[in-house]
Image (cartoon, rainbow, N blue to C red):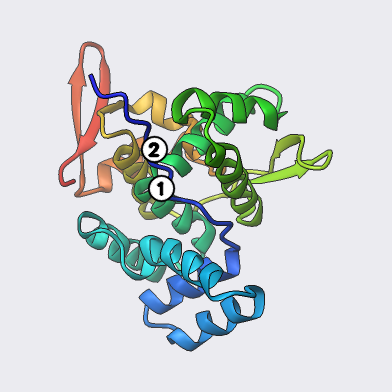
Amino acid sequence: MSSATPQIGFDRFIQLDWAAAAFRIRAGLAGEDELTRLIDASHAGAAAKKKTRTVLNRLWLEPRADLVDFADRGVGVYRACPETSVSALTWGMAIATYPFFGKVAEIVGRLTALQGDCASAEVHRRMAETYGEREGTRRMTNMVLQSQASWGAIKRTMNGKRLARMPKQKLPGPEPIAWLIESALRYSRLSLSVSSLENAPILFPFQVNGAARTAIAKSKFIDVFLSGSEEHVTLLTV
């Protein structure tokens, strides 16, 4: 049995306007100079700029080979439904690309499900159980939480000691819902029940409940099958 600890990967705070600029470049709506200006204005050193660029590249500009089509279809979702927020699309790319980001999102979604908020210390404790009590785990968990706050998913209160859910984003149609469900499947790498997806912790910032079945039925990339008495879904392409 391997004892290797999972890799973190998502190791920078990513402000929403930086992610939006990277998305616009991929969509052909902006040039590289827009993102360069934003990063130059907010980063002091060359090393910091490079690290932020690396995360943005993986999200939108140079995704992994298995996620290139998924990223391009995210752009297609935006073109078909321009009301779709870039934060929702970037959330989907982040959980599909970075298991560390996805794990933080899943934990926050679970812990805030009942009362709408939770202690950040509990998120850190659960992340340490998976990623170990190493130096980077706590710092990078904070980077993810700070990014999620910038993207409108949570609000950090009491000097970051508590995390509160922000109101769920309404998605403008079945296309963005199906694409986000696909991102959750890519994160989990497992088949999931349709009922669990309707309230999936990892998709907590978005209104999916009640619309998942309709969205899945319209997707060419998600397969539905019966397992016992429940409908499950899996990816047709990975």
In the figure, 16 relative to 97: above or below?
Answer: below
Numbered disc 2: secondary structure: helix
Residue 189 can be seen, yes or no? yes
N-term-proximal mark, 2 vs 1: 1
Q: Amino acid at mark 1?
A: Ile
Name which residue type carries label 2: Ala
Residue 103 placement (x, y as % from top left)? 46, 35
Choose top left, top right, bottom left or bottom right for residue 176.
bottom left
Picture disc at residue 122: none
The residue sitting at 60% across, 63% down in the picture is 15
Q: Which residue is mark 1?
A: 177
Q: Is residue 86 above or below residue 117?
A: below
- What residue is shown at x 53% (from left), y 58% (from top)? 87
- Residue at horizontal 31 percent and vertical 38 percent from the top: 185
- Which residue is labeled 2 in the image? 212
Does 59 appear above or below 213? below
Q: Identify which residue, 136 or 153, lies in the foreground.
A: 136
> Does 34 sit above or below residue 7?
below
Q: How dense is the environment of label 1, judged by Cα within 10 Å: few (below 14), some, or many (20 and up)? A: many
**Is the Cβ of the residue at disc 2 closer than 8 Å to that at disc 1?**
yes
Whether residue 146 sits left or right of residue 85 in the image: it is right
